[in-house]
Amino acid sequence: MAPCRALHWCTVSPSPDVRSEVLGKLTTHVLDAAHGCPGNAIRIELYRVEGQQLLHVVSAVTNSDGRCDAPLLQGDTYQSGVYQLHFQAGDYYRARDVVLNEPAFLDEVVLRFGIDAGQEHFHVPLLISPYSYSTYRGS
């Protein structure tokens, strides 16, 4: 088995006079923990929670690396608030001929989280299998 390569990330703090021009972003990616690979071709919906309503913001599909080709929020759309990500995990496993009970135990994974737009980047990874999922605030 090949060793893992460590990735090192760093951030550069802009000088105070240009800090207001730095715009944040929201990104996600999906890892298939059951098969040890990226979760490609997973449909994702992002909603903003306003009171009791869900306002659709954007739709995306993960690429071969399990990531979206563009940030889900960035620029003017990157605002503080409560959001929900909806991941179509059941469709992903059905497309790969994984035998699921019907209805699937985890057909749609919904993550509700808050964003403080004062932060430059929110990354919300999702690790899935047919019977469990895990998430965390990434960087």
Image (cartoon, rainbow, N blue to C red):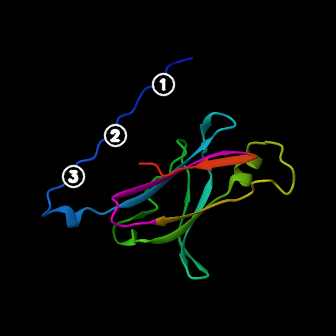
Q: Nearer the viewer, residue 45 or 85?
A: 85
What amino acid is at disc 2? Trp
Q: Main secondary structure of the magenta part?
A: strand
| Residue plotted at (37% across, 56% down) | 121
Q: Position of residue 134 (x, y in %)?
A: 62, 48
Q: Residues within 10 Å of mark 3 (few under 14, many from 20)?
A: few
Q: CA distance from mark 3 to mark 1?
A: 29 Å
- Mark 3 or mark 1, whichever is nearer to me: 3
Magenta region, residue range: 115-129
- At mark 1, the secondary structure is loop
Residue identifier under label 1: 4
Q: Which residue is mark 2?
A: 9
Task: Identify the disc placed on residue 13.
Answer: 3
Q: Earlier in the sequence, mark 3 or mark 1?
A: 1
In the rendered structure, which amino acid carries the disc numbered 3? Ser
Q: CA distance from mark 1 to mark 2?
A: 16 Å
Q: CA distance from mark 3 to mark 2?
A: 13 Å
Q: Is residue 52 above or below residue 101?
A: below
Q: Residues within 10 Å of mark 1 (few under 14, many from 20)?
A: few
Mark 3, secondary structure of its residue:
loop
Q: Is residue 120 shown left or right of residue 35?
A: left
The spot of residue 49 in percent (x, y) is 55, 75
Position of residue 86 in the picture relative to residue 97 (left or right): left
